[in-house]
Amino acid sequence: MNTYVRVAMCLVFHVAGCVAYTFLNDAVVDAYKAFNGGFTTRGVGIGIAHYTFIYIFFGVNVLAAVLPGLWAKLGLLALMVAWILFMMVPHNPLRALFYTVAQGGVTLLAILLTQVIELRWQNRLLTRRTLPAGPVQEGVA
């Protein structure tokens, strides 16, 4: 697969994951407000940390789309999840759980989907090269 095609395909899947996450986040926020009456009713507001995690999520997805190696992508994902857990668990464990599962899951899904497509593309090209061009004619004696 051409490098530019691979990067474009990865960007499409990661951007689609980011868009899906924003809708998921809005749905979960609405459900949380409906059940608990809002974010600050219990005295704990998340403030600007939410936007920080969103920007980190977008940045990690762009980097994961551009990086070629699977282990580099997974390492970057592990750093993002570890950072969210480190920052959120002491004060907001429920939100830490949501951010790590939702952001980590969406990014992992995009990484795995692009890897599967790349492997199938390579396998298809490999089998196309090894198969004969036409059917083999056997003579009857």
Image (spheres, rainbow, N blue to C red):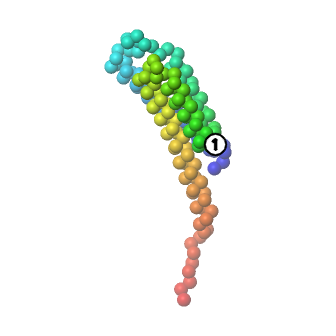
Nearer the observer, 87 or 105: 87
Residue drawn where x is 66% and y is 48% of the image: 2
Residue drawn where x is 57% and y is 57% of the image: 124
Nearer the observer, 25 or 135: 25
Percent x, y of residue 89: 46, 23
Above or below residue 81? Residue 51 is: above
**Which residue is disc 1 drawn over?**
68
Residue furthest to the right: 3
Residue drawn where x is 63% and y is 50% of the image: 1
Above or below residue 120? Residue 61 is: above
Can residue 61 be seen by looking at this rendering? no
Above or below residue 98? Residue 111 is: below
Amino acid identity at mark 1: Pro
Q: Circle 1 sits in a helix, a strand or a loop, which is it?
A: loop
Residue drawn where x is 54% and y is 89% of the image: 141
Nearer the observer, 80 or 21: 80
Percent x, y of residue 87: 51, 22
Percent x, y of residue 74: 56, 39
Quarter of the image where one finds residue 83:
top right
Q: Image check: 31 left or right of 11?
A: left
Residue furthest to the bottom: 141
How packed mark 1 is, by other alpha carbons closer than 10 Å (few <14, some 14-19, many 20 or more), is some
Can residue 122 be seen by looking at this rendering? yes
Above or below residue 128? Residue 136 is: below
